[in-house]
DNA sequence: GCCAACGTTGGC
DNA sequence: GCCAACGTTGGC
């Protein structure tokens, strides 16, 4: 399978790029959306590129990047009674929800803001800049889009 | 299976 | 806090 690229969103008040930098590898869990779940379960593979996006932040945008360290596995939080993300329908036989592990790569000196993404040529079709699908917490990114965002991020 | 009501996300 | 854009739920 060719390497793919993803954009994963987090509210920095819940989990920020600083947290990721400190943790190195973190479990990307608590995703409770079927479209995103399907990506995590079926498509995200070890070595894939990850753009880390801060939502509901100031500024909002891509804060850094990394790679997938572990492909989809059952999200334990769905099966833990009392967990905020507990789902009574989830079980060992039928986990329903999936997680992946992601490995920190770099933190951009300056966040590549959503505003900048929208203005950048070549990113017109990037999911996060379009109305359709913009809310998805795990989004596919094309190799070209990934490269452009990385270039802007490295430029600082 | 349709569709209205309701809930959530997230930019602004 | 508002609201657009969905996703989910549940009555029928």
Image (tube, coloured by chain):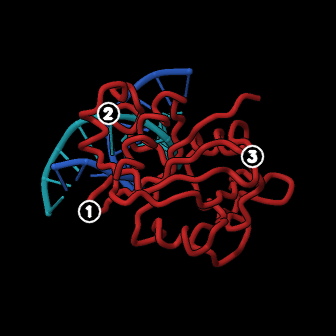
Chain colours: A red, B blue, C cyan
Q: Name the residue beneath numbered marker 1.
A: A58
Instruction: Write down the quadrant of residue A23 in the picture.
Output: bottom right
Residue depicted at x 63% and y 68%: A24
Drawn side of residue A111 relative to residue A33, left or right: left
Residue depth check, mark 2 versus mark 3: number of the one nearer the observer: 3
Q: Do discs 1 and 2 share a chain?
A: yes
Give the crowd class for mark 1: few <14, some 14-19, many >=20 residues within 10 Å.
few
The extreme bottom residue here reads A82
Residue depicted at x 42% and y 49%: A154
Q: Chain of mark 1?
A: A
Q: Is residue A123 above or below residue B8?
A: above
Residue depicted at x 49% and y 27%: A144
Drawn side of residue B2 relative to residue A91, left or right: left
Distance CA(mark 2)–CA(mark 3): 29 Å
Residues under numbered marks 1 and 3 in contact, where contact means CB atoms less than 8 Å apart: no
Q: Name the residue beneath numbered marker 3.
A: A46
Question: Residue A123, position in %: x, y?
Answer: 36, 29
Query: What is the count of numbered marks?
Result: 3
Mark 1 or 3 closer to N-term? Answer: 3
Mark 2 or 3 closer to N-term? Answer: 3
Instruction: Write down the quadrant of residue A57 in the picture.
Output: bottom left
Residue at disc 1, secondary structure = loop
Mark 1 or 2 closer to N-term? Answer: 1
Q: Chain of mark 3?
A: A
Residue at disc 2, secondary structure = loop
Who is closer to the viewer here, A55 or A20?
A: A20
Residue depth check, mark 1 versus mark 2: number of the one nearer the observer: 1
Label disc, if present, on residue A131 of the rendered structure: 2
Image quarter (top left, top right, bottom left or bottom right) of the N terminus of chain A: top right
């Amino acid at each position: 399978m060719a390497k793919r690229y993803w954009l994963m969103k987090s509210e920095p008040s819940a989990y920020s790029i600083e947290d990721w930098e400190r943790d190195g590898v973190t479990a990307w869990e608590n995703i409770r959306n079927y479209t995103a779940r399907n990506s995590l379960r079926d498509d995200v593979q070890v070595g894939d590129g990850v753009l880390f996006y801060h939502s509901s932040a100031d500024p909002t945008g891509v804060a850094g990047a990394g790679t997938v360290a572990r492909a989809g596995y059952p999200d334990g939080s769905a099966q833990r009674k009392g967990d905020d993300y507990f789902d009574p329908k989830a079980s060992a036989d039928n986990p329903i929800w999936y997680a992946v592990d992601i490995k920190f790569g770099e933190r951009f000196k300056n966040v590549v803001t959503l505003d900048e993404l929208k203005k950048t040529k070549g990113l017109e079709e990037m999911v996060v800049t379009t109305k359709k699908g913009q809310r998805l917490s795990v989004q596919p990114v094309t190799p070209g889009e990934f490269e452009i965002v990385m270039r802007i991020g490295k430029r600082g």
